[in-house]
Image (tube, rainbow, N blue to C red):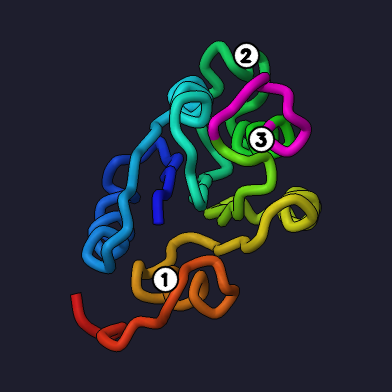
């Protein structure tokens, strides 16, 4: 499975990316909205892992940091970025430490799964498996 992991903090990507790669998935990374849009235009992804708080870049200039992920998701679903290689209906897993329940409720309407940070990589993968976003099952879920 080809996954785009959109997260501005490199340290936050390390564990989950390593676990997903260990399970045979290809994981590309983007650290801001501009990089995410470029990758969505040039690659077909099967899943997107998306942080809510991101630098907006030019793609979402003027959007507050704490809403960039939400706006990126809404723009993806609406087709606002023009022709993409990735389907507008691609499964999206939103990762957030933002405790704004209204924002979380709005995100839940357009994503497949919302996970609250901090979250252990094994727990995140288990939740994605349970939600049917990742194929198969982990027989070694406790080891990495």
- Judge by depth and name the residue closer to the eye, 33 or 87: 87
* Residue position for label 2: 61
Q: Is residue 36 left or right of residue 94?
A: left
Q: Judging from the image, what secondary structure is the residue with disc 2 in?
A: loop
- Judge by depth and name the residue closer to the eye, 94 or 76: 76
Q: CA distance from mark 1 to mark 2?
A: 32 Å
Q: Is residue 51 left or right of residue 22?
A: right
Between disc 3 and disc 2, whose residue precedes? 2
The residue under the point 54% across, 31% down is 85
The residue under the point 35% across, 38% down is 29
- Judge by depth and name the residue closer to the eye, 4 or 136: 136
* Residue position for label 1: 125
Between disc 1 and disc 2, whose residue precedes? 2
Q: Are marks 3 and 2 in contact (CB under 8 Å)?
A: no
Q: Is residue 118 left or right of residue 83?
A: left
Q: CA distance from mark 3 to mark 1?
A: 24 Å
User: Where residue 67 is drawn, which disc sits there?
Assistant: 3
Q: CA distance from mark 3 to mark 2?
A: 11 Å
User: Up-down: is 144 above or below 77?
Assistant: below
Q: Judging from the image, what secondary structure is the residue with disc 3 in?
A: helix
The residue under the point 56% across, 37% down is 86
Quadrant where the N terminus sits is: bottom left
Q: Is residue 55 visible?
A: no
């Amino acid at each position: 499975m080809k996954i785009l992991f959109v997260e501005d903090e490199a340290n936050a990507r390390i564990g989950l990316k390593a676990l997903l790669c260990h399970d045979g998935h290809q994981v590309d990374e983007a650290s801001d909205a501009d990089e995410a849009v470029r990758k969505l235009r040039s690659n077909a992804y099967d899943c997107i892992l998306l942080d809510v708080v991101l630098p907006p870049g030019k793609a979402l200039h003027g959007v507050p940091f704490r809403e960039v992920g939400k706006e990126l998701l809404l723009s993806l679903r609406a087709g606002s970025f023009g022709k993409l290689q990735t389907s507008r209906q691609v499964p999206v897993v939103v990762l957030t430490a933002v405790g704004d329940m209204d924002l979380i409720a709005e995100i839940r309407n357009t994503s497949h799964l919302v996970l609250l940070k901090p979250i252990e990589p094994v727990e995140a993968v288990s939740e994605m498996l349970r939600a049917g976003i990742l194929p198969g099952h982990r027989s070694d879920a406790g080891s990495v």
